[in-house]
Amino acid sequence: MTSTPPVTLDDVRDAAARLKGVAHRTPVLRSRTLDARVGAEVYLKCENVQRIGAFKFRGAYNAMSRLTPEQRAAGVAAYSSGNHAQAVALAARELGSHAVIVMPEDTPRSKRAATEGYGAEIVTYDRYTGDRAAIAQAVADERGLTLIPPYDHPHVIAGQGTAALELLEEVGALDALVAPVGGGGLIAGSATAVKGLSSDALVYGVEPEVGDDTRRSLAAGQRVAVPMPRTIADGQAIEIPGEITFEINKRLLDGVVTVSDDEIRDAMRFAFERLKLVVEPSGATGLAALLTGRLEQVPRRIGVIVSGGNVDAGRFAELCGG
Amino acid sequence: MTSTPPVTLDDVRDAAARLKGVAHRTPVLRSRTLDARVGAEVYLKCENVQRIGAFKFRGAYNAMSRLTPEQRAAGVAAYSSGNHAQAVALAARELGSHAVIVMPEDTPRSKRAATEGYGAEIVTYDRYTGDRAAIAQAVADERGLTLIPPYDHPHVIAGQGTAALELLEEVGALDALVAPVGGGGLIAGSATAVKGLSSDALVYGVEPEVGDDTRRSLAAGQRVAVPMPRTIADGQAIEIPGEITFEINKRLLDGVVTVSDDEIRDAMRFAFERLKLVVEPSGATGLAALLTGRLEQVPRRIGVIVSGGNVDAGRFAELCGG
C-alpha cells in the first residue's frame, strides 16, 4: 500500500487551468548548435520570459488563487529578496490582494524597486542579526496575513509543475527532463507532471556544486543540510531541501547532478551568444549540465527548464564579460 | 505612367517560398512593459534568432538560390566582416556552393571563426590601404566567382522583405513598421512588403545619428554621402545609400529618424533586462526610436524588426555593463 502523494498530475492540471490567461505560455526554443553539442534534440522551455522573469509566478499565483476571499482581502506575506518576492507581489496585484515582502536591508535597489513596482509593501531586516522566516511569521501574525512559502507547499509545487506540463503538451513525450533544484519546488512539480504523463521518462535535477543538499539528501535517504552555499546561482543558495519537496523528489527523481560556477557562467555565455537569450545563473544550470555532459544518460529527446532571466546588464557584465 | 519598381510584393513572396524550411520563421514577441512605455501595441519580429543571428541570411540565400547550377558550382564571393559574411557562408553551404569572403586583416577572431565554421574561405586585406570592393571583384574575376552584394541587389532586397511579410502574416495589418537602415536593403524590402499589403501603413527607417545618409538623401531627393560614421551600430556604418535601395526607399518610406549611440545602449539594456533578448547595436535602433519617442506619429499597432543579435558577451559588457 502506498500513501497518496502530496501533489498529483491532476493538481498540476488544475493549476494550469487557474494560470490560463494569467501566466504566459512561454515559448519552447530549439537550436541546431545546441543539439549538435549535446548529441540530442533539446527543447528549452523559456521561463526567463515568464511574467516577473521566472517560473516563480506560477507557484505563487496558484497558491494565492486558492485563498478564501477573506484571506485575500487580509493580504499575504513572503520573505525573499529574489524572484519569489516579485512573484508574490504580482500575484497579489492580479488577485486584488496586498503583499508584504520581508527583505534584507542590503537588497539591491533594483530588486526592491521591481517588487514595489508591482504594488507590494517592503519590510526590511538586518541580514546578520535577523531570522527572516521568524520576522515574516511575526509580521503575518500581527497583521493577519497568509504566509506564501517559496517552495514547500503543495499548491506552490503544483503551480511550478505547469511549465513542464506545457512543454510536454507542446512537443510531445520526452525521454528526459532537466531542471534546476533550489528548495526543490520546480523539480518536484516538473517530475510530478512528467512521470504522471509517461512513467519511463527520466527526470534529473541540477544543483550548484557547493549547494548539493538535495543530491546529498537523496544519497542519505533523508534531508541533510549543507553550509549556506556561496554560489553565483543565488536562486539555489539553499541549505536543506523542503520537507514536502524532498518527499516527492525522493520518489520521483532519477538523479541530481552538480555544476560549478564557472560551468554556469559558460552556459550563460552560450545562451547569450548562441541562443540570444538572457538567463540568470540559476536559470542556466540545466543547460550547463547538458553542455558539460554531466548526465549519465543522454537520450534522444531532452527538455530543459530555463527557469529565469533576472540578471541586470551590469551584473551580467561582471559575471560573463571577462 | 510609372516605371516598374525594381522589387515587388510578388518578388518578396517568391523569396519567402524559397526560404521556407531553410530560414527560421522567427518568433514575434510582445511585452506589457514595452507597450506601456510606448503607448501602443508593439510587435517585435526577432531576427536576432534567425540563422547566423541576423536577417542577412534571408537576402543572401534568396540571391544565391537564383544562381545557375554552373554559377553555384563555381562559387560566390562577398566582402564583409559582419553578418553578411556569415550569411553568404551559410547560404553557400546550404546550396552546395563555395564562398570566398574578403575581410580586413584585423577582423575579430570570433567573427572570422564563425564564418570559417560555415565552411567559407577567408581572404584578408589591409583595411588602411586596400579597397575591399575592388579586392573582392578582383578575387571574383580571377576565380570565376559571382559577387553577392550586401544590399544593392533586387534579390537581396526581396529576401530581406520576407521578415516583414512573415510578421504581417502572423499578426495581421499594422499601422506602422519600424526597421533599421544601413545600406537600405532591409527597409526597402520591408516597405515593399508592408505597402504592398496595405498602402496606408506607415514605414519608418532608423539610422544612427552620425550615419544619417539615407535621411539626408531623402531630404535632398538624391543620394548624398556622409563621412564614414563612427558609431557602435557597426551594421549601419555606411557612407551612402545603395542605388537600388534608395530608388525604392525614396518612393516608399514615410520618414527616417535617428538615434544616438547612448540611446542605442539604453535600448540594448532594455531588451536585455525586460525582454531577456540579446540584441546587437544595429538591431536595437528600431526599439531605440520607440523608447525615445522619436517617431512623429505613434499609431496603435507598430511592428519593429529586431534585426540582429550578434554581439559577444565581452563586447556587450563593454557597451552596457557600466
Image (cartoon, coloured by chain):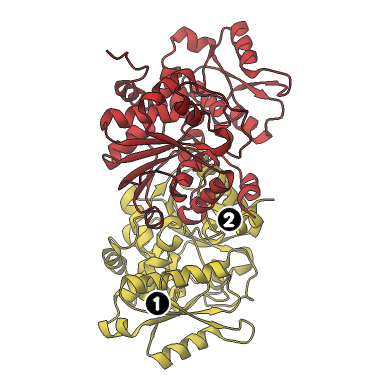
Chain colours: A red, B yellow
Residue A164 image point, x, y percent: 36, 34
Q: Would you say residue B39 is visible in this rendering?
A: no
Q: Quadrant of residue B108?
A: bottom right
Quadrant where the image shows the N terminus of chain B: bottom left
Left or right relative to A202: residue A154: right
Please determine whether, in this image, residue A247 is positioned above or below residue A280: above
| Residue drawn where x is 63% and y is 87% of the image | B129
**Disc 2: which chain?**
B
Q: Which mark lies nearer to you, 1 or 2? A: 2
Please determine whether, in this image, residue B282 is positioned above or below residue A277: below
**Disc 1: which chain?**
B
Please determine whether, in this image, residue B78 is positioned above or below residue A322: below
| Residue drawn where x is 64% and y is 19% of the image | A132
Numbered mark located on residue B313 in the image: 2
| Residue drawn where x is 52% and y is 77% of the image | B222
Q: Would you say residue A23 is visible in this rendering?
A: yes
Relative depth, front residue between A26 and B255? A26
Relative depth, front residue between A177 and B76? A177
Q: Give amino acid for label 2.
A: Ala
**Between disc 1 and disc 2, whose residue precedes?**
1
Q: Give amino acid for label 1.
A: His
Residue for badge 1: B153
Q: Which structural element holds mark 1?
A: loop
The reply to whether the C-beta atoms of the residues labelled 1 and 2 are less than 8 Å apart is no
Relative depth, front residue between B13 and A64? A64
Numbered mark located on residue A109 in the image: none
| Dots 1 and 2 on the same chain | yes
- What is the crowding at mark 1: few (fewer than 14 residues within 10 Å), some, or many (at least 20)? some
